[in-house]
Amino acid sequence: MSSSPRDISCHEALEHLYEYLDHELTPEVEAEVRGHLVACVVCTSRFGFEEVFLKFLEAKSQAQGASPELRRRILERLFLDPDVPER
Amino acid sequence: MDIAEKQAAFEREALIHLDVLYRVAVRLTGSAADADDLVQEAILRAFRAWDQYRPGTNARAWLLTILRNQFVNDYRRRRRHQEAAEEIAGDPNAVFMSAREVDPTGAFFDRIVDAKVLEAIDRLPEEFREAVVLVDVEGLSYDEATQVLEVPIGTLKSRLFRARRRLQRELYDYAVEMGYIKASAP
């Protein structure tokens, strides 16, 4: 892209807070938000805090997966009994 | 496709997602035993419907959609009390505003143990919880999550926003209580 991104306000940047952190913005809007963050220490701090929160949430919510027992039961149902009956 | 081929394809493309299905099921049902049953039923249903799955498309989202429909049909209606997300009065303020004087980088979050985070997720109203579990815990894109939850993207964003606010507030309050962070002056 040759033209520089449009200037946006703190309010507008904050409206895109989570979409920005979730990488869900279009490249143009993402560039606008990034441009705002370069220029605004308050929003940089705010976005940084929210980013820490989301990473924390992901890291600390990784519960255990399926037990070996469940896996075995499912494989048995699926593959030893191919005509898995309708319930 | 003969049965051996079908089984091999199902094992290769669907069963690799068993752990994801189980983790989501635990958060939806709130119990390991119910999650076992829900996952087993969803997997058998998926196997029967396997010819409707288009190879190479998103098997994880497809399976989660089946799991979630199974949950809505079989489990949710059995629950005694459903807290409707819509009835909850106002969203809490952003925790950043409370924490920025004493801990603007959110270092206190790191002192909170996993069990507390999972408990806080489990206390969310179901509509919020399922959005958080899919996007924040399992890392689905908005697009995938709207497919699984069958809601418009605006609804998903709104639920995520509100769910994250509530989680933040609850975990912040806990951190204050535990002395991980000093409460800011009102």
Image (tube, coloured by chain):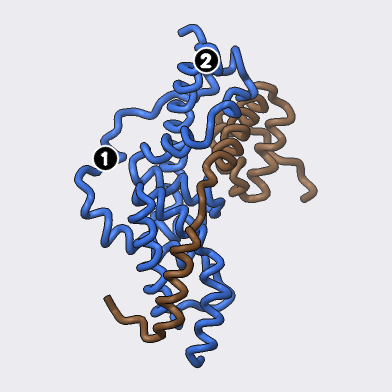
Chain colours: A brown, B blue
Q: Residue furthest front?
A: A69
Residue at label 2?
Answer: B179
Q: Is residue B182 left or right of residue B163?
A: right
Residue at 54% over, 87% down: B5
Task: Kindly report which numbered mark, 2 or 1, lies closer to the viewer in this rendering.
Answer: 2
Q: Earlier in the sequence, mark 2 or mark 1?
A: 1
Q: Is residue A78 left or right of residue B89?
A: right
Can residue A10 be seen by looking at this rendering? no
Q: The residue marked by circle 1 belongs to what chain?
A: B
Q: Is residue A18 left or right of residue B38?
A: right
Task: Give the CA distance from mark 2 to mark 1.
Answer: 31 Å
Residue at 51% over, 55% down: A65
Q: The residue marked by circle 2 belongs to what chain?
A: B
Q: Quadrant of the C terminus of chain B?
A: top left
Give, as a three-letter code, the residue at label 2: Gly
Image coordinates for residue B145, horizontal then vertical, percent: 47, 55
Report crowding for label 1: few under 14, some 14 to 19, many 20 or more residues within 10 A (C-alpha).
few
Residue at 43% over, 78% down: A78
| In the depicted structure, whether residue B176 falls above or below residue A25 | above
Q: Residue furthest right?
A: A2
Residue at label 1?
Answer: B83
